[in-house]
Image (cartoon, rainbow, N blue to C red):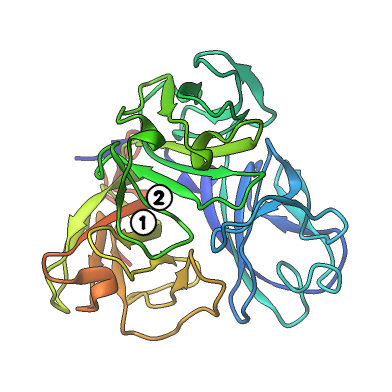
Amino acid sequence: MAYSTIIKPNTQFTPTIYSGNDVDGRAITTGFQTDWTWIKRRNATNSYIISDIVRGATYKLDSSEATAEVNNYAGGHLESFTSTGFTLGAGSINSGHTNATGGTYVSWNWKAGGTASSNTDGTITSSVSANTDSGFSVVTWTGTGANATVGHGLGSVPKMIILKNRDSAENWIVGNTSLGWTKYLALNLTDATTTASNIWQNTAPTSSVFSIGDSGKVNGSSNGMVVYAFAEKKGFSKFGSYTGNGSTDGTFIYTGFKPAFVMWKRSDSAGYDWDMYDTTRDTYNVAFKELVANSSGVESSSTVLSLDMLSNGFKLRTSNANGNASGGTYIYMAFAENPLVANTSGGIPTTAR
């Protein structure tokens, strides 16, 4: 039984939906100190806005592009992080990316550790905001252009790492324990896995550091770098892989909790998206409101690619090769809405919806 010490997952991670109002200083409430937010306008073609507490709220990256970081203070996308969420600029000054009248939006929000601390565990000194309870940290450092290790502050081994060169138009780099640390995927592309020794040095992360090679993608000389690192926590988060069965009675993936958010990517073949689903946009099964991390496109409402969010995992309800090709391999990340059983729940399992 997947007991969890995180009784209320929505104090560590939550999806939030809202409608834009074109008001400067608009406050969005997530219910906790938000240290990383990933925002997408659902009803228009707009860039993703990715901001975090370590780089600063006004500095944005876009998961659908290889572009370098931009300080959008004047553009007003995100203005600040608060103890209960974050504040936005007016839609008229942020091109509708986060707060336009008539816009519908989703933000996925994580709690890290607040203001960053210096970390000297690796050969490069990093700045780290770490939440060891939920297994999530934001890490920044200045690249050296040489093989190195970087401290992540989690105190446990990361199972998934999302990395971006902030100062250069390099692809996003994703490592996942199921791929092995000789390979990587690009978050902004539909490519299959690439094998390269100059990304992770063919070395798995440890409980204190992750290894990076001399590629400009992961350690560009004098470039600012950022990592979002995730360690698995029972009943709260899961990072792994599954094999498709090509049936509308699709593969079931056990997570040990009712998911609030799932993202997956086919890894063995090119041409497939990073699909994102959550229980805030889809409040009942079958879930079919799809956003794609590698595309700025409008939210899809087609049932061609769909799934059930269950009390202990998720089940594909499609034969579409983007999520469930027969024999296809996929990596995924998932975060809980409710644990299957919390340590203080008296052994009463959560229910499906």
Q: Secondary structure at mark 2?
A: strand
- Image point (60%, 27%), residue name: 128
Give the residue pinned by disc 1.
Answer: 259
Q: Quadrant of residue 95?
A: bottom right
**Residue 236 visible in the displayed image:** no
Image position of 226 (left or right of 70): left
Q: At label 2, which amino acid type do we have? A: Phe
Q: Nearer the viewer, residue 182 or 58?
A: 182
Q: At label 1, which amino acid type do we have? A: Pro
- Image point (30%, 59%), residue name: 192
- Image point (57%, 61%), residue name: 65
Number of marks in picture? 2
Image position of 157 (left or right of 209): left
Callout 1 touching callout 2 (CB < 8 Å): yes
The picture places residue 91, in percent across and down from the top left corner, at 81, 72
The picture places residue 199, in percent across and down from the top left corner, at 40, 37
- Distance (Cα) linking label 1 and label 2: 6 Å
Task: Return the disc, 1 or 2, that comes first in the chain's sequence.
Answer: 1
Give the residue pinned by disc 2.
Answer: 335
10 Å neighbourhood of mark 2: few (<14), some, or many (≥20)?
Answer: many
**Residue 258 visible in the displayed image:** yes
Q: Quadrant of residue 111?
A: top right
Q: Secondary structure at mark 1?
A: strand
10 Å neighbourhood of mark 1: few (<14), some, or many (≥20)?
Answer: many
